[in-house]
Image (tube, grey):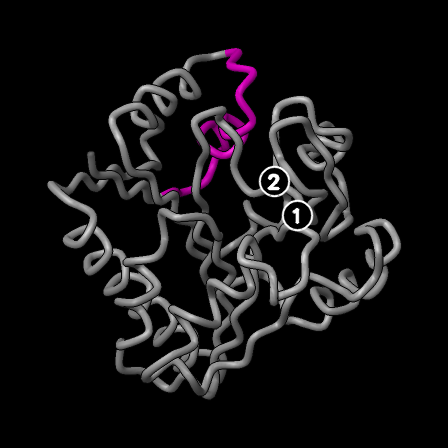
Amino acid sequence: MSQQHALHAFDDGQTLAKALSTSIASKLREAIDARGEALIAVSGGSTPKRLFEALSNEALDWSRVTVTLVDERWVPDTDERSNARLVASLLLQHKAADAEFVPLYVETPTPEAGIGEARARVAAMRQPFDVIVLGMGPDGHTASFFPGGDRLSEALDASNTALVLPMRAPGAGEPRITFTLPVLLKARSLYLHVQGDDKRDVLAQAEKPGSALPVAHVLQADRPLDIYWCP
């Protein structure tokens, strides 16, 4: 593991969620104190549910916080697979109900058709992000950097100036839209939230030199990364 990475291991998901929530809330408060606002991008899926519930109860000035997504399935928020729907139901509640949410999904048939509007929305948010929280799949994907993705090399290109890209891949299910790697790596605070012994094994594979797993581009980047893991 890189000397810039910190692995925080916990016995269970609830304990992890509270610790990660506390750390994120501290970073958001620091951002508000320094710049008058805070910007956070989160990931979807099943792993962050406890985190979202814990974070929604953190005491800070949520009216100064903008929340968006690292990536999104190209489905409306009425669809149960929508990450925006997950964020609305679990994170934008309680104290966090005052936060502003910026969705990546646009009401167009394809992400390619809506990419201009999505890019405009992300560009309107002051970069870099204060906090980005990533997840990881058992196939080694993070964000929507799926193995076999049609625009994977473009999304992982360190010189790419695009903020978001469409992505289609065999393992992705629906078409997706995703932040590019440069956006992730510029974040002031970058977290990787992982649960399960199987995913710990994937992390170990991704940390090996020459790994082809997409998450390796985050794990092997020359920047600080906080990894939160539990069985």
Does the magenta segment cover residue 219? yes
Q: As shown in the figure, which amino acid type bears the numbered disc 1? A: Thr
**Image vertical order of residue 67 relative to residue 63, above or below:** above
- Rendering quarter of residue 97: bottom left
Q: As shown in the figure, which amino acid type bears the numbered disc 2? A: Ser
- Rendering quarter of residue 31: bottom left
N-term mark: 1 or 2:
2
- Rendering quarter of residue 108: bottom right
Relative depth, front residue between 207 and 100: 100
Q: Residue at x 51, y 60 (%)?
A: 41
Q: In the rendering, which numbered label is found on residue 178?
A: 1
View extreme (right): residue = 113
**Image vertical order of residue 86 relative to residue 219, above or below:** below
Q: Residue at x 82, y 56 (%)?
A: 115
Relative depth, front residue between 41 and 187: 41
Please provide percent x and percent y for residue 107.
79, 66
Q: Which residues are magenta?
A: 210-225
- The tally of labels here is 2
Q: Which residue is mark 2?
A: 144
Q: Residue at x 88, y 55 (%)?
A: 113
Q: Are marks 1 and 2 in contact (CB under 8 Å)?
A: yes
Majority secondary structure of the magenta segment? loop
